[in-house]
Image: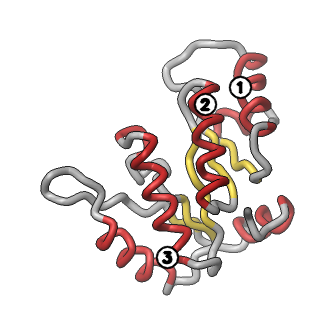
Amino acid sequence: MSQYTQQELRDALSAGLLSFPVTHFDHDYRFDEAAYRSNLDWLSSYSVAGLFAAGGTGEFFSLTSAEVDRVVKAAVEQVAGKVPVIAPAGGGTAQAIEQARAAEASGADGILLFPPYLTECDSDGVAAHAIRVCRATQLSTRRSLFAIKLNL
């Protein structure tokens, strides 16, 4: 469970640099956890305000759900409460709910909710998606730019 209330997380993430670390892979394209943890140590020495594990530059769309879980768990363990960890949730609604719940179980402090990818729908559909995902977990949600423009 997150150590932050929604307001505390909002305040923490507004206080400085947000870090979107790349996800490290070995020569066989498997997640290189040791290299990733080393990079997190280096990043956290710069007083980042929040760490977005497996986010936009963290290969979210290239990872399986199990790999995202491993990346998020490694980040949560490595930063050990020193900085909020935000995990990704995206894809279709059912997939995003599954990822949000996995993030919560992994100890993430919030989720970065991406809208359904390459899906045309009106703003009511995107809003319904975001609402269902948000209601499926107790985590605070940082919505992607598209959802923010809808005032969700």
- Left or right: 16 with respect to 132? left
Residue tagged 2: 115
Query: Which residue is drawn at the image coordinates 74% and 71% (left, top)?
Result: 12
From the viewer's perspective, is the residue at label 3 or at label 2 nearer? 3
Crowd rating for badge 3 (residues with CA inside 10 Å; few <14, some 14–19, many 20+): some
**Gap in Å between the C-alphas at discs 3 and 1?**
31 Å
Crowd rating for badge 1 (residues with CA inside 10 Å; few <14, some 14–19, many 20+): many
Q: Secondary structure at mark 3?
A: helix
Q: Secondary structure at mark 1?
A: helix
From the viewer's perspective, is the residue at label 2 or at label 1 nearer? 1
- Left or right: 89 with respect to 42? right
Residue 129 numbered mark, or none: 1
Q: Which comes sooner in the sequence, label 3 or label 2?
A: 3
Quadrant of res 26: bottom left
**Gap in Å between the C-alphas at discs 2 and 1?**
8 Å
Residue 78 numbered mark, or none: 3
| Farthest residue, direction left | 27
**Residue 101 image offset from top left, x and y in percent:** 65, 44
**Residue 61 image offset from top left, x and y in percent:** 41, 38
Compared with 114, 37 (above or below) is below
Q: Amino acid at mark 2?
A: Pro
Q: Are marks 2 and 1 in contact (CB under 8 Å)?
A: yes
Residue 38 numbered mark, or none: none
Q: Which comes sooner in the sequence, label 2 or label 1?
A: 2
Query: Which residue is drawn at the image coordinates 54% and 59% (left, top)?
Result: 52
| Position of the N terminus by quadrant | bottom right
